[in-house]
């Protein structure tokens, strides 16, 4: 039936998911007469389409918050990690601060961030940023430090400057670790954006979740959950794709 | 062609072991002897020592090493394990400073060891290829660092691929190559970093014996073609004789020079010279010297 291995692989992975959805649909229809706990999948999907405009705007908003938090956090995390790797005194002075900042659960800061940045997009971006930069810093620092001394010596014998050593050897060496941190970071950014919306916002998937909760609107709640899942897995998939396509040498270092 | 150490002219025929008197630095093919004609030796070490401080007690890795390599010469250096070969490698490569007291001359000029960094193209035991670079971009690494554009560097490297047995693998990544091929890529990278002295540290140490024998013959061909000055560190006596114009033996730790033997075997050398009388004669001399030193280091370790 299926000729190409690509198709067969796809089917192997998709079939269980489809099976679960069918089971969900059937069980919800048998047991959930009132839709109070577990609405059937079809109802949820219809609900999403019925509410298309609002949900699409919310989806776009949360996506924007996530990306706007994630990208600067990745850049900042990399720069901080690179600085710590180069300048030992900077690491000794500031790394403990980084560490302490991460021991405070982000929700404890939520109210503060809303007061500082308002209930617009910036407060969510800030929380996403806060959750994301630290793993990137740690993995950058660790990767840059772990470079084989023999390779450094070899490049130095060719006359390489510190700048060349950094870009031609240390960064490529650290990249697989950095990509792993980015995979973690993109999920954390989404969490940051959603949690940020709970503290105060007018639009976004987090807001849809909270509103649906107060209204006990199960169909809308499940719709928002589904969209959060789609958003999360799409972003994760993009980063994973980039990692596999351009940074594939992790196993060899 | 016979060995081209200047002293070779004083040596009537092939095998002529010259024993270095212990402690005397008037070494065989001696550091103090000026070459007969023309250019100064590429490198001369005179009583070079290196002492490490290991947890409070002094470890003398090498103690008054004399060594000289002339232009175009292929010198093979052997010694029992733990004789300070790697220390010597690091000093000649410019990666480590020697103790004060000794002298290093490079191209006739007196240098500190660390000043040799960048003047010697060296190849450590491991191939140290960058997994994220294609083979072609691995071999041009030195050219690129020196400021040549990538396309110029590639154009310069491409004609060499056939000679290194790597035709068709230019665009492969290192993880797609066998151990022997990776080693050839590393050697090609070393050849493309053109410096007066090439320093090779057991480049074939990790290969199986058949591949190794092939690589040795191949290295001679390439060397014949490119005519570089080579200091080749190994622990394999046959390899040293087969490749070298001259074989130098180090003592057990603390390492110094024990013996220097001219290998007067004609080039080009074929695989069958390994069983020739001249080869076996040299082998016997070297084996005796190395055996003695290995025993010493074995005994000192077991005490």
Image (spheres, helix red, strand yellow):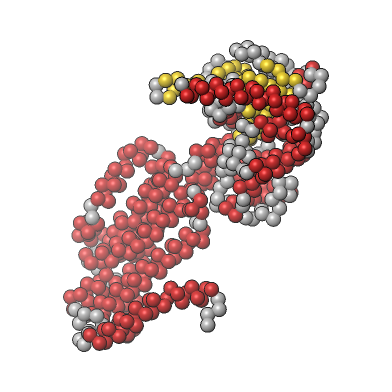
Image point 55% across, 76% down: which residue?
A4
Residue A102 percent location from the top left of the image: 27, 51
Comparing A89 with A174, the one in front is A174
- What residue appears at the point 20 percent right and 86 percent down from the top-left corner? A34
Instruction: Identify the residue at image location x=80%, y=33%.
Output: B267
Residue B194, position as x, y percentages in the image: 68, 37
A168 vs A213, left or right, is right
Up-down relation of residue A118 to residue B34 (above or below): below
**Whether residue B114 can be seen here:** no
User: In front: B133, or B286?
Assistant: B286
Against B24, residue A10 (above or below) is below
Which of A194 and A4 lies nearest the eye of the viewer? A4
Q: Residue at x 53, y 38 (%)?
A: A150
Q: In this figure, what is the number of numbered marks?
A: 0
Determine the image quadrant of residue B202: top right
Left or right: residue A154 compared with residue A59: right
- Across and down, in percent, residue B32 comes to 68, 14
Q: Position of residue A47 (x, y in %)?
A: 30, 83
Q: Quadrant of the N terminus of chain B?
A: top right
Residue A240 visible in the shown view: yes
Residue A145: image quadrant is top left
Between B289 and A36, the residue placed more toward the observer is B289
Q: In the picture shown, does residue A116 fall above or below B182? A: below
Left or right of A144, for residue A20: left
């Amino acid at each position: 039936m299926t000729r190409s291995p690509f198709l067969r692989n796809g089917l192997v992975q998709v079939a269980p998911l489809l099976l679960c959805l069918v089971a969900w649909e059937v069980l919800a229809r048998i047991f959930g007469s009132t839709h109070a706990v577990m609405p059937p999948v079809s109802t949820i999907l219809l609900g999403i389409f019925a509410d298309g405009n609002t949900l699409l705007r919310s989806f776009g908003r949360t996506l924007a918050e996530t990306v706007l938090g994630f990208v600067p956090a990745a850049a900042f995390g990399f720069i901080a990690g690179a600085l710590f790797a180069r300048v030992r005194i900077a690491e000794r002075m500031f790394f403990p601060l980084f560490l302490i900042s991460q021991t405070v659960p982000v929700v404890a800061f939520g109210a503060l961030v809303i007061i500082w940045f308002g209930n617009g997009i910036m407060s969510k971006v800030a929380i996403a940023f806060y959750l994301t930069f630290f793993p990137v810093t740690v993995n950058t620092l660790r990767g840059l430090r772990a470079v084989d001394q023999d390779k450094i010596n070899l490049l130095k014998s060719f006359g390489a400057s510190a700048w060349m050593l950094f870009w031609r050897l240390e960064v490529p060496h650290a990249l697989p670790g950095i990509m792993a941190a980015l995979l973690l970071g993109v999920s954390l950014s989404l969490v940051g954006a959603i949690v940020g919306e709970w503290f105060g916002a007018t639009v976004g998937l987090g807001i849809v979740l909270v509103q649906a909760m107060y209204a006990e609107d199960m169909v809308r709640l499940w719709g928002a959950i589904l969209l959060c899942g789609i958003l999360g897995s799409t972003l994760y998939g993009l980063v994973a794709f980039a990692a596999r396509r351009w940074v594939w040498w992790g196993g060899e270092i | 062609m016979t060995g081209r150490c200047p002293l070779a002219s004083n040596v009537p025929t092939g095998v002529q072991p010259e024993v270095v008197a212990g402690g005397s630095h008037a070494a065989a093919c001696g550091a103090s002897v000026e070459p007969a004609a023309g250019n100064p030796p590429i490198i001369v070490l005179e009583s070079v020592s290196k002492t490490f401080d290991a947890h409070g007690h002094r470890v003398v890795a090498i103690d008054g090493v004399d060594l000289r390599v002339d232009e175009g010469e292929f010198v093979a250096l052997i010694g029992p394990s733990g004789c300070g070969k790697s220390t010597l490698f690091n000093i000649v490569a410019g990666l480590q400073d020697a103790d004060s007291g000794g002298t290093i001359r490079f191209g006739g000029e007196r240098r500190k060891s660390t000043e040799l960094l960048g003047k010697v193209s060296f190849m450590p035991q491991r191939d140290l290829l960058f997994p994220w670079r294609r083979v072609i971009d691995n071999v041009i690494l030195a050219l690129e660092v020196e400021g040549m554009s990538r396309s110029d560097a590639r154009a310069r490297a491409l004609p060499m691929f056939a000679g290194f047995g790597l035709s068709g693998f230019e665009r492969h990544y290192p993880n797609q190559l066998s151990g022997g091929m990776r080693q050839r890529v590393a050697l090609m990278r070393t050849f493309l970093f053109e410096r007066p002295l090439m320093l090779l540290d057991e480049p074939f140490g990790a290969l199986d014996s058949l591949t190794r024998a092939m690589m040795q013959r191949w290295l001679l061909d390439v060397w014949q073609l490119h005519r570089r000055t080579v200091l080749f560190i190994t622990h394999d006596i046959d390899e040293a004789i087969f490749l070298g114009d001259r074989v130098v033996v180090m003592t057990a730790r603390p390492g110094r020079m024990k013996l220097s033997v001219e290998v007067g075997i004609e080039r080009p050398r074929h695989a069958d010279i390994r069983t020739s009388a001249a080869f076996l004669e040299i082998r016997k001399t070297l084996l005796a010297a190395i055996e003695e030193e290995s025993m010493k280091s074995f005994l000192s370790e077991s005490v």
